Image: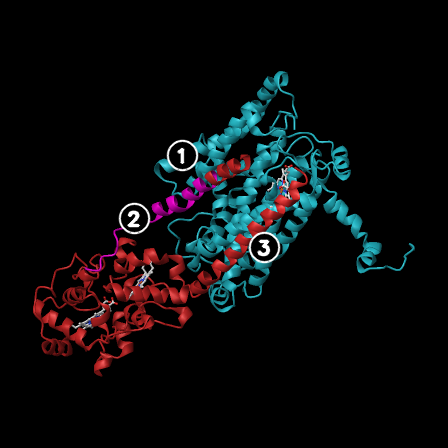
Chain colours: A cyan, B red
């Protein structure tokens, strides 16, 4: 057994047993972050914080929610919204938080793409991030079902139906997911389990893993510059803080994060109190009714772009059924972002505005995603259907073209600019 | 400053997306309709063009209406019993004590004269194969009809609570589960569609939609079985207020605490900015 002296303070007592000072150094005061970053690098901490808000508000909702098709709607809309003290506040926070988490995820993800933070050693950060995106999507989808309103029911119906398109096992798969031949009580109770237990646990694990993947490659910076972290940390620790290219996570990095977080929270609570309909669809305040199809069925805004890719193919092409093409395109859309590190053939890690071809590619992608999102909500009739069709094709072509675009760019820049770097 | 530029770009794309999935999509789902018309201009002018006689109105009412309708504040109960009425008409005909207060006068006159037309239900009841549950009184003179309206106005209370207006205007068809209001009716059988429970309707449809829907259901749901009720502006306001009291009962609380929370967060922005400046002044 190790030798223990009598501790002179409570802090020391813990330090002897848990090495708290060492832990704090490794995790906070000597965990190094590049200095040359902007507020986009605060998005990760905002996500972590918003997830915490979702967990806390979720726990309060869980105390009164009843996962039963006959009681769910009233337990949410009557018990929680009207009877429980500040129940409405927790529900609004949870609903708005679920929507905003996706806004921030998308900003975080496109920041990664813009600055090329997914390659040259950062592939695992990227993949763990994609894993989180999938988990969050599953979490949001399962949660949306719980109030058992019209949209809960019909979105569940439409989305679970998608799996029916998978060859051979499709039909059985749908029944397996629903636990019944139609969306029913068994569907609600299993999605309830997923939403409050299995997926949150997986997300916690996912976040821990995502943080761990950041350790070795470190986060990127505004110029994509390669930094010798040991040397720069040394400069910092020996007092040359101004010349050092790094800052410690605590307090310097967090000082900026807390400011960005405060601005975000102001926006968050403004929406919670005054402008929540975008996140809590009014249609979902009608109780679920399997006999009354709503005039328009659409998923939440953050799923619209991939939903539009699914339904963009609305007519049979060369013997292939429209629904099958849509399903393949949908599958493509789900996985393609994960392949970014391998589709981008250029070794350059630099912000897009310093990469001639990639810059154009990036902004075209953003515009196409927004078009898909907007048309994903509109009724797919007349010209809308064609806009959906062509933008779905454009989306797919864009990703197929990425290797060629970046290869050409690499050839072009090889002679002129240095692949990484830029002066400080 | 560079960060502000980035912030501007993100805000721009976020707002474009927001505009597309919210205002644009909603304007397509719910095309613009004309604002509520509380004069019911499509109807014949009856009350403005004739004279009235309250005593005559009282007599006509007791001859024609109380077979089906009660007038409680005159101590008159309907001759038909509740269950028979529900069996025959699907609904229990509303008590008429408050009719003079809640319905727009000229609408009321038109409803008596020709209920299907005033209620905009011609597509449901052609008067040949299918008859409306209340007979029309087009055989009466406009003056007599006006007299009945004047009579209803003379006996109406001067004020009603929001809930009372709701019960008289909507309560024969619609439930309000969260306020334990239950319509004793079997409307589905007669009308072919079920009146939804209105407990959460203020959240699902919103005030804006309700204002035009109650005033004229056909504007939003072409061909619907719900009749145009013909409430005057203040009665309709009371109904919507009631829907809000039940379906969005915490609105006042929400709006009361919002400034405190936002004020606190505004203060946090300020303090954290100072802290950031202080910490970063050492490194930059
Ligand atoms: C939803 C939960 C997520 C949390 C809590 C989270 C958290 C974080 C944190 C704290 C950082 C470091 C600081 C920063 O650069 O912001 C980070 C970096 C990063 N994350 Fe995430 N993230 C999440 C999802 C994602 C997703 C969906 C992706 C994209 C697929 C992603 C990709 C990345 C990348 C590429 C970096 C490195 C950025 C750089 O090197 O500059 N993350 N994440």
**Cα–Cα span, label 2 and label 1:** 24 Å
**Position above or below: B127 against A45:** below
Identify the chain of the residue marked 2, using the numbered disc in the image. Answer: B
Report the predominant secondary structure element of the magenta stretch.
Answer: helix
**Position above or below: B198 against A339:** below
| Mark 3 vs 1, N-terminal side | 3
Which SS class for mark 3? helix
Q: Position of residue A148 (x, y in %)?
A: 48, 59
Q: Mark 2 near mark 1, Cβ–Cβ under 8 Å?
A: no
Which of the numbered marks, if any, corresponds to residue A53? 3
Task: Residue at 58% x, 40% y: name it.
Answer: A39
Give the quarter of the figure containing the C terminus of chain A.
top right
Look at the image and give the residue range highlighted in magenta.
Answer: B13-39
Name the residue that disc number 1 marks.
A387
Task: Residue at 66% x, 38% y: name it.
Answer: A125
- Seen in the image, is A228 located left or right of residue A265? right
**Residue B56 or residue A352, whichever sits in front:** A352
Q: Position of residue A342 (x, y in %)?
A: 63, 30
Q: Look at the numbered disc 3 and say if its residue's Cβ is closer than 8 Å to ligand 1.
A: no
**Cα–Cα span, label 3 and label 2:** 38 Å
Give the quarter of the figure containing the N terminus of chain A.
bottom right
**Residue A294 or residue A125, whichever sits in front:** A125
Which SS class for mark 1? helix
Name the residue that disc number 2 marks.
B32
């Amino acid at each position: 057994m190790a030798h223990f002296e009598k501790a002179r303070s409570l802090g020391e007592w813990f330090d002897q047993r848990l090495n708290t000072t060492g832990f704090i150094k490794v995790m906070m005061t000597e965990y190094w972050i590049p200095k040359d970053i902007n507020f986009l690098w605060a998005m990760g901490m905002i996500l972590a914080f918003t997830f915490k808000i979702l967990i806390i508000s979720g726990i309060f909702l869980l105390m009164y929610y009843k996962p039963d098709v006959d009681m769910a709607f009233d337990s949410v809309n009557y018990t929680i919204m009207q009877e429980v003290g500040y129940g409405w506040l927790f529900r609004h926070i949870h609903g708005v938080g679920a929507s905003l988490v996706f806004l921030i995820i998308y900003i975080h993800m496109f920041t990664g793409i813009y600055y090329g933070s997914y390659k040259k050693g950062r592939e695992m950060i990227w993949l763990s991030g994609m894993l989180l995106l999938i988990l969050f999507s599953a979490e949001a989808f399962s949660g949306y079902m719980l109030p058992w309103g019209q949209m809960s029911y019909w979105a569940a119906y439409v989305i679970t139906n998608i799996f029916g398109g998978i060859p051979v096992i499709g039909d059985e798969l749908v029944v397996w997911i629903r636990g019944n031949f139609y969306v029913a009580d068994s569907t609600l109770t299993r999605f309830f389990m997923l939403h409050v237990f299995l997926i949150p646990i997986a997300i916690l694990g996912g976040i821990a893993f995502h943080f761990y993947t950041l350790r070795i490659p470190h986060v990127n910076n505004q110029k994509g510059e390669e930094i010798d972290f040991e040397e720069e940390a040394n400069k910092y620790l020996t007092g040359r803080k101004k010349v050092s290219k790094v800052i410690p996570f605590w307090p310097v990095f967090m000082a900026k994060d807390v400011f960005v977080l405060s601005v975000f929270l102001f926006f968050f609570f403004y929406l919670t109190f005054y402008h929540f309909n975008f996140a809590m669809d009014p249609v979902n305040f009608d109780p679920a009714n399997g006999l009354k199809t709503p005039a328009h069925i659409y998923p939440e805004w953050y799923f619209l772009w991939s939903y539009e890719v699914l339904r963009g193919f609305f007519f049979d092409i060369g013997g292939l059924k429209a629904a099958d093409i849509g399903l393949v395109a949908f599958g493509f859309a789900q996985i393609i972002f994960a392949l970014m590190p391998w589709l981008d053939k250029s070794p350059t890690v630099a912000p897009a505005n310093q990469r001639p071809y990639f810059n154009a590619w990036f902004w075209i992608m953003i515009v196409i995603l927004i078009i898909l999102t907007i048309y994903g909500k509109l009724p797919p009739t007349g010209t809308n259907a064609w806009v959906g069709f062509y933008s779905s094709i454009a989306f797919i072509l864009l990703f197929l073209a990425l290797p060629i675009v970046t290869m050409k760019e690499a050839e072009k820049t090889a002679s002129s600019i240095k692949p990484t770097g830029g002066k400080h | 400053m560079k960060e502000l530029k980035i912030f501007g770009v993100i805000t721009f794309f976020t707002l474009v997306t927001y505009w597309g999935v919210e205002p644009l999509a909603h304007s397509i789902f719910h095309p613009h309709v004309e604002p509520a018309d509380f004069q019911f201009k499509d109807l014949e002018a009856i009350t403005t063009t004739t004279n009235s006689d309250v005593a005559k109105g009282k007599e006509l009412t007791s001859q024609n209406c109380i077979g089906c309708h009660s007038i409680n504040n005159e101590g008159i109960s309907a001759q038909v019993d509740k269950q028979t009425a529900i069996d025959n008409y699907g609904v229990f005909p509303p008590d008429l004590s408050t009719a003079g207060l809640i319905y727009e006068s000229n609408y009321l006159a038109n409803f008596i004269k020709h209920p299907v037309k005033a209620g905009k239900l011609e597509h449901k009841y052609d008067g040949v194969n299918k008859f409306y549950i209340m007979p029309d009184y087009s055989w009466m003179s406009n003056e007599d009809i006006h007299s009945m309206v004047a009579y209803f106005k003379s006996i109406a209370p001067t004020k009603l609570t929001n809930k009372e207006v709701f019960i008289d205007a909507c309560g024969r068809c619609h439930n309000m589960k969260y306020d334990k209001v239950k319509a004793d009716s079997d409307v589905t059988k007669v009308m072919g569609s079920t009146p939804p429970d209105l407990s959460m309707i203020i959240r699902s449809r919103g005030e804006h939609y309700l204002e035009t829907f109650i005033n004229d259901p056909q504007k939003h749901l072409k061909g619907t079985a719900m009749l145009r009720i013909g409430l005057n502006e203040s009665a309709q306001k009371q109904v919507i207020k009631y829907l809000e009291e039940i379906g969005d009962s915490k609105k006042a609380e929400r709006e009361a605490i919002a400034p405190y929370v936002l004020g606190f967060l505004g203060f946090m922005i300020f303090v954290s900015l100072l802290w950031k400046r202080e910490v970063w002044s050492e490194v930059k």
